[in-house]
Image (cartoon, rainbow, N blue to C red):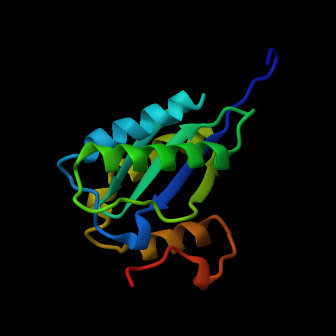
Amino acid sequence: MSNTYHQLIIQTVFAVKYRKAQIDPGWKPELQGVIGQLINQAGCKTLVVNGVHDHMHCLFGLKPSLSVSEVMKSVKSKSSKWINESGHLSSRFEWQVGFGCFSYSRSHMERVSRYIHNQEKRHQKISFREEYIQMLQKHGILYDERYLFEDLK
């Protein structure tokens, strides 16, 4: 689209199904690369991808002709397929249904990038559930406890 100028900076957060600790540090960098490539292939611009054993964070520039849901549907399904075909796990891998989505101004990009880069250190002190609830509250997002990411049954 000519004459369309934009700056839509989005952070998404999504969890492994039942928040199982399935993302191994040995192959996590490869997964981050795959996720980043999938975001770029969707027509967006990957800024940062990082996470820990049970969830991932992505910071990217969103193309205005796309919805975040479209991008995440593609990223989650194709990265699940990659994990399942890679042989990294002996059991089937799935991402949990849903995701968190937060928007930022350019002035917050550096701070959010640092936050995402420091996930391993952060999760030595705080659980994913606590982190996620803090993010929802900080952004003024009303939520129902019943629909937060499911824990292992």
Q: Residue 80: give x, y in percent of width and height.
A: 41, 50
Q: Position of residue 50 (x, y in %)?
A: 36, 48
Which quarter of the rendering shows the C terminus?
bottom left
Q: Is residue 69 above or below residue 7?
A: below
Residue 123 against residue 25 in the figure, above or below: below
Q: Residue furthest top?
A: 2
Q: Residue at x 67, y 38 (%)?
A: 8
Residue occupying image coordinates x 31% and y 58%: 52
Which residue shows up at 33% across the image and 48% down it? 83
Which residue: 40% across, 63% down?
A: 16
x, y percent for residue 78: 47, 43
Question: Splitting the image into 4 quarters, where does residue 23 fall?
Answer: bottom left
Quarter occupied by the N terminus:
top right
Q: Nearer the viewer, residue 97 or 15?
A: 97
Picture coordinates of residue 145, whole percent (x, y): 59, 84
Relative side of 33 to 65, left or right: left
Depth check, front residue: 91 or 148: 91
Location of residue 141 with respect to 67 vertically, above or below? below
Q: Residue furthest right?
A: 3
Query: Which of the 4 image quarters holds residue 136?
Result: bottom right
Q: Is residue 68 left or right of residue 120?
A: right
